[in-house]
Image (cartoon, rainbow, N blue to C red):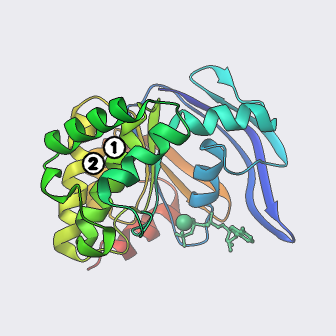
Amino acid sequence: MRLEFRAIGKAFGELQALRDVTLNVAEFQSLAIIGPSGGGKTTLLRIIAGLETPETGQLSIDGQRLDFSEASLLLHRRSIGTVFQAYNLFPHLTARQNVMLPLVKVHDVAVGEARAIVDSLFERFQLSAHADRHPAELSGGQQQRVAIVRAIAIKPRFLIFDEPTSALDPEMTAEVLDFIAELRADGRNLIIVTHNMGFAREVSDHCLFIADGRVLEEGRSSELFSRPQNPLLVNFLAKVLRY
Ligand SMILES: Nc1ncnc2c1ncn2[C@@H]1O[C@H](COP(=O)(O)OP(=O)(O)OP(=O)(O)O)[C@@H](O)[C@H]1O
Ligand SMILES: [Mg+2]
């Protein structure tokens, strides 16, 4: 897929979260967004997902310009699968109901058909044994896998992840990262904010480094991780890779 940002700016009150982001990311399948805390990663992701509207600038996805009217944003949001930090399932619904809900309520899929879609996805991703359990009866890793299945059930144009493993212990992190790597191997388009550099490097073909509201470096992941140019990126990688 392709992303084109032109002079995107976003402020929260006095705070300038994104400053004049201009960038053309041509042809990627999987994009990682990395950078220090507070740099603007989530804000950029939310703009791509249509959950946040920039004050200035333009965004095109696959050559299609997103106009930020409420009606287009609504359609846009529905076409994307989003997964945020852990615990985004409804606690009072079973795993199966959690995945069926958006299909039935938002995408107008008939209940029987929705159930068939969910059951086949659960089967494919080894979640069938958990279908009738509530989130509290599942491990964090299982919950997050259900959340990912919920995102792909709607047949999204692409998937967005914002630190999908930040609330998980190392073993569950591995389980969820393996799952995301599998989606990539399936040929799905992914955009992932992650603090896990090993994963970013392995799963993404393209990478953005964002700090202080600016995209300071952008390129093929193989290139960016092995030959970082911007001193802030060099510093950042040295710091996060130290342990
Ligand atoms: N809804 C909001 N209201 C006010 N300020 C916000 C809001 N969302 C983000 N910000 C501010 O905008 C800046 C960028 O935030 P953002 O969440 O995009 O950073 P981030 O790179 O995702 O950080 P982290 O790695 O900690 O998640 C931060 O200074 C943050 O405090
Ligand atoms: Mg964030």
In the picture, measured across the screen, residue 189 lies left or right of residue 182, that is right
**How far is disc 2 from disc 1 in space, using C-alphas?**
11 Å
User: Is residue 103 something that shows in the picture?
Assistant: yes
Identify the image quadrant of residue 79. Answer: top right
The residue closer to the viewer here, 63 or 72, is 72
Whether 214 is drawn above or below 234: the answer is: above
Q: Considering the image in quadrants, where does the C terminus appear?
A: bottom left
Where is residue 186 shown, x and y percent of the image?
Answer: 23, 31
Residue at figure coordinates x 24%, y 73% from the top left? 137
Quarter of the figure with residue 110: top left
Q: Residue 226 at what x, y percent from top left?
A: 30, 51
Dot 2 lies on which element?
helix
Give, as a three-letter code, the residue at label 1.
Ser
* In the depicted structure, whether residue 60 falls above or below residue 118: above
The residue that label 1 is drawn on is 204
x, y percent for residue 77: 61, 39
Marks counted in the figure total 2
Compared to residue 42, the image places residue 156 above or below, namely: above
Give ligand 1's quarter of the image. bottom right
> Which residue is rendered at x = 47% and y = 29% of the image?
157
Residue 68 visible, this orientation? no
> For the view shown, which residue lies furthest in the top direction?
63
Q: Residue at x 24, y 56 (%)?
A: 177
Q: Which residue is mark 2?
A: 180
Circle nearer the viewer, 2 or 1: 2
Q: Hey, what amino acid is under mark 2?
A: Ile
Q: Crowding at label 2, few (<14), some or many (≥20) Cα neighbours within 10 Å?
A: many
Residue 224 in picture, x, y percent from top left: 39, 48
